[in-house]
Image: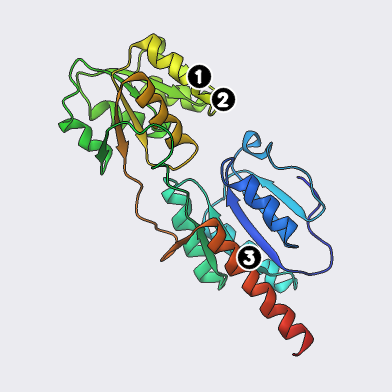
Amino acid sequence: MHGGPLDQAPGQRLWLFSGTGDGPPLMRELLQRGWQLCVSVVTAEASRPYASHPRLELRVGPLGGSEALRLALESAQRQGRPFTAVIDATHPFATQIHRQLQVACQQAGVPLLGLERQSATGLDPQPPVTWLERLEDLASAELAGVRLLLAIGARHLALGVQSSPGAVHHARLLPRPAALQLALAAGLDPGRLACLQPLAPASGVEAALVRRWRIEVIVARQSGPPTERLWRRVAAEQGCRLLLLRQPQSLATDRRYSRLELLAQLAAHQRRQIHLGTGT
């Protein structure tokens, strides 16, 4: 835990659910604007970019479901230290977490603000993209005999392999035992697996991997920068076809806010609270 349990005098508090991409810069901006902040990440590895701060509490581990979050939100309300809002800055494909945040916030009566990731289009060289609405669409992509790189997350490898019979499958994984187990269970050859830290600088490692394996087609997700940008750049530089799995429709909120829109929403709330506090 970074900082303390936020047992300072009651103030404006936010609960941010995020990872290593959008979370750290958003955290810094919110702290600069005077918010007390609780940040939840899933793994200890994801917690490393979050620097210690007296107004920051860092929680590491699974969410525990919507009921656990509802109880935590209601407990904070009873203690006189309520959360002004919950911010969902999790991965666009983390559909289960999106649902859990939505249910918990609705039940606890706490606003949920979803962060919309920046688009990866219009940045860097843009390769031709074939869009997939779902992984099963790989079955119609004519991939028999093609050297295919799956960069879609370990949990989805089994479906990706099943949906592209006849392809020569390769996968890029996070260096976690569970990811390797899932890849092997999906039937991938150990010699065609690469366990790498996320987003090697300047895409050099990923580009070298594509060259070494003579990859012809890359399957990735419309996850926004930095990951989607990386695979767009690698595909363009290495002359690969890029198949992008389209981002699922938002499940957690009716709309998602850009970073600037979200900060504006929170600043407006702070101004209202100041106005009410001064009685003007």
Counting from the top left corner in percent of width and height, residue 274 is at 74, 79
Q: CA distance from mark 2 to mark 3?
A: 38 Å
Coloration mode: rainbow
Residue type at the position of mark 3: Leu
| Quadrant in the picture for residue 93 | top left
Please name the residue that numbered disc 3 is placed on.
73
Residue 224: mark in rendering? none
Side of 196 where 85 appears, left or right: right
**In terms of depth relative to the viewer, which is nearer, 63 or 17?**
17
Please name the residue that numbered disc 2 is placed on.
201
Residue type at the position of mark 1: Gly
Nearer to us: label 1 or label 3: 1
Counting from the top left corner in percent of width and height, residue 154 is at 42, 30
- Residue at figure coordinates x 27%, y 37% from the top left: 135
The reply to whether residue 176 is visible in this rendering is no
Residue 204: mark in rendering? 1
Q: Residues within 10 Å of mark 3 (few under 14, many from 20)?
A: many
SS type, badge 3:
helix
SS type, badge 2:
helix
Counting labels gives 3
